[in-house]
Amino acid sequence: MLFIPLSLLLHLSDPNLPIENPISPPVATFSIVGYDAETDQLGIAVQSKFFAVGAVVPWAEAGVGAIATQSWANTTYGPNGLKLLKSGLSAEQALERLIADDPGHATRQVGIVDAKGNVANYTGDACNKWAGAVSGKHYTAQGNILASEAVVKAMGKAFEETEGELADKLMAALFAAQEKGGDSRGQQSAALLVVQENSGYGGFNDRYIDLRVDDAEKPIEELQRLLNLHKALFAR
């Protein structure tokens, strides 16, 4: 169940009541950030027992990098991290800067892939267990409040072994993670973001695939259905 502060519940029942110090719930999540050297696509796939996770975790810019920010997510890691990557810093260097500038870094979890395929990840000591990450060539997979370490390991293995476009590799990782128990609290939302230069609608932006399932019993399956529909409608 999504945590809703008592003050917010009272406010919903009586809008005249103030909302006092609402506490955001952690984005208990598993995600994978990846890069495809053949197409220069960058992307993120994520699932969480959290409403509308796609509005919080994934950030990407073609030719720059892709970032997943989660746990007690600091959403400034997305735009600020992309700025750092755009300035010429590597994934590891950008991550070090983000953490150094954030007094709450112990509660954060982040995965970054830059436009050269370099990867970096970070799991703060205060993230809820099980929390951690694995990385390999052109990808990093991370999660918190997971069933076990097997979840992130399964994501990495699926990414490495799956053929096809980057989106297919990322989705395979989500399915593999869920098979190993996924988010220990259950499922609710999922998202897939893949960027490639001039690959958005009409070639006017870089959002090749931008799909979200905000609230569903089986969000990964629904996300796959949307991806299949996207492929059918926008075949290249």
Image (spheres, helix red, strand yellow):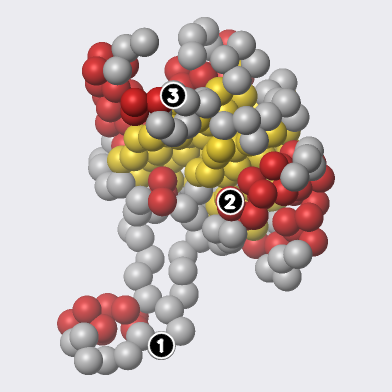
The local secondary structure at tag 1 comes to loop
Which is nearer the eye, 198 or 6? 198
Instruction: Report the residue at 29% width, 18% height from top.
Output: 234
Residue at the spot of label 2: 78
**Mark found first going from the N terminus, 3 or 2:** 2
Residue 23 percent location from the top left of the image: 46, 75
Kind of residue at badge 3: Ser
Instruction: Report the residue at 32% width, 79% height from top.
Output: 8
Kind of residue at badge 2: Gly
Spatial CA distance of label 2 from label 1 is: 27 Å
Mark closer to the observer (3, 2): 3
Instruction: Report the residue at 22% width, 91% height from top.
Output: 16
Residue at the spot of label 3: 199
**Mark found first going from the N terminus, 2 or 1:** 1
Q: Which mark is residue 79?
A: none
Kind of residue at badge 1: Glu
Mark closer to the observer (2, 1): 2
Compared to residue 166, the image places residue 149 above or below, namely: below
Residue 226 percent location from the top left of the image: 28, 27
Spatial CA distance of label 1 from label 3 is: 44 Å
Which is nearer the eye, 1 or 68? 68
**Mark found first going from the N terminus, 1 or 3:** 1
Residue at the spot of label 1: 20
Q: In the rendered view, does 89 fall on the left or right side of 2?
A: right
The local secondary structure at tag 2 comes to helix
